[in-house]
């Protein structure tokens, strides 16, 4: 009797092909889905991350450089875009040096031609009031941030905030200096590196009260969600300027933690609380800084330090 093949039975070649097709869609390790990453030319498992096929593409330059000067010479692209320039750095700039490509000084006629080219280049880069406004404001932000020693990330965030204010038509009736200072103050708070408002007023071209008004208006209109300042964030800056010991800084941080847990900080100037905590800590560690010295560093009045110092010590002495 001859053996008859079952109608649903498939040949070994067909079963192998089925397994290969399934293997293309499922991971053999965890049976997870396999996806294709176009950026890196890889097939990977979504579940366990197993790489099945790798054909990495090098997106870097085809040349090699071992020093920064050599890299600058071989690079064929300009600087990256930045929100700190009114045109984001996309336009060309004619250098101020009156020299040719070989570094040789150009003739007087060529110098006059270069001067005219720079003049027209500047006019085209700021061809309307909108761009002139941005250029002036972003220049002010860079100047103030440099004077305050703020990092590049804070400057860029301030530039983005000011651009949003211009796009939302918030500038009419308000000074460029006031809004640019308010943008920088808001950016510093967003990045967790706050400075007393008096420091911004010292480097700004407007008064403190105008910066406060501009900041409140900017925060309300742009819907900025900025958490209240924590007094402890001012401690490293003040402690470094006063050159106190690590023990004093640690105790001052403990004093502020106790005050915060008891809601003593509510409604009070955080910079004043930090200064008062440092002043109190120096008395506990026998460093005994004067109120005048602490006041000069923190830019708060001696009356504020004296009042807050007594409140902080009362709560600190009553802790569990």
Image: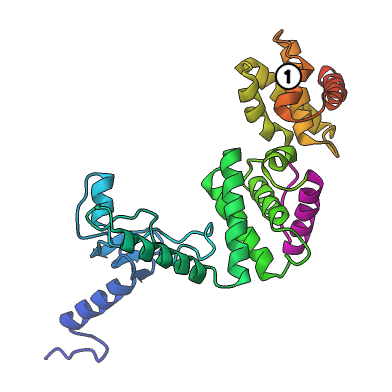
Q: Position of residue 287 (x, y in %)?
A: 69, 10
Q: Which residues are magenta?
A: 208-229
Going 52% across and 47% down the picture, which residue do you hit? 152
Residue at image location 82% in from the left, 47% down from the top: 209
Element on which disc 1 rests: helix
State yes or no: residue 65 in magenta.
no
Residue at screen point 70% across, 19% down: 251
* Residue at the extreme left: 2
List the residue tagged with mark 1: 293
**9 lies above or below 166:** below
Quarter that holds the N terminus = bottom left
Q: Which class describes the residues within 10 Å of circle 1: few (<14), some (14-19), or many (20+)?
A: few
Q: Is residue 257 visible?
A: no
Q: Position of residue 198 (x, y in %)?
A: 74, 38
In which quarter of the view is residue 297 placed?
top right
**At 25% across and 58% down in the image, what residue appears?**
101
Task: From the viewer's side, name the closer residue of 31 and 175.
Answer: 175
Left or right of 14 on screen, residue 290: right
Is residue 210 a member of the stretch shown in magenta? yes
Percent of width and height locating residue 32: 39, 66
Image colouring:
rainbow
Q: Nearer the viewer, residue 124 or 217?
A: 124
Left or right: residue 139 versus residue 93 is right
Task: Pick the residue in front: 291 or 42.
Answer: 291
Q: Residue most toward the top?
A: 286
Does the rendering let one see residue 53? yes
């Amino acid at each position: 009797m001859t053996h008859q093949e079952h109608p649903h039975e498939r040949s070994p070649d067909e079963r192998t092909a089925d397994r290969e097709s399934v293997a293309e869609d499922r991971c053999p390790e965890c049976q997870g889905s396999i996806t294709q990453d176009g950026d890196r030319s890889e097939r990977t498992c979504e579940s366990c991350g197993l790489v099945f096929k790798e054909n990495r593409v090098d997106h870097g330059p085809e040349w090699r450089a071992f020093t920064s000067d050599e890299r600058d010479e071989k690079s064929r692209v300009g600087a990256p875009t930045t929100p700190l320039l009114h045109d984001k750095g996309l336009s060309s700039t004619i250098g101020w040096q009156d020299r040719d490509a070989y570094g040789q000084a150009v003739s007087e006629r060529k110098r006059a031609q270069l001067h005219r080219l720079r003049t027209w280049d500047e006019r085209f880069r700021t061809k309307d009031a909108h761009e002139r406004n941005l250029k002036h404001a972003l220049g002010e932000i860079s100047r103030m941030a440099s004077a305050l020693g703020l990092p590049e990330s804070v400057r860029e965030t301030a530039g983005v905030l000011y651009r949003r204010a211009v796009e939302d038509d918030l500038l009419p009736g308000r000074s460029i200096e006031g809004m640019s200072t308010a943008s920088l103050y808001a950016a510093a708070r967003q990045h967790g590196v706050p400075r007393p408002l008096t420091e911004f007023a010292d480097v700004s071209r407007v008064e403190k009260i105008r910066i406060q008004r501009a900041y409140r208006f900017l925060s309300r209109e742009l819907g900025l969600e900025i958490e209240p300042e924590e007094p402890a964030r001012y401690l490293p800056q003040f402690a470094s300027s006063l050159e106190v010991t690590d023990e004093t800084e640690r105790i001052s941080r403990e004093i502020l933690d106790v005050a915060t847990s008891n809601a003593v900080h509510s409604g009070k100037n955080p910079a004043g609380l930090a200064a008062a905590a440092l002043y109190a800590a120096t008395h506990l560690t026998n460093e005994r800084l004067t109120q005048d010295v602490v006041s000069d560093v923190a830019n708060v009045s001696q009356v504020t330090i004296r009042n807050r110092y007594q409140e902080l010590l009362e709560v600190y002495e009553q802790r569990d």
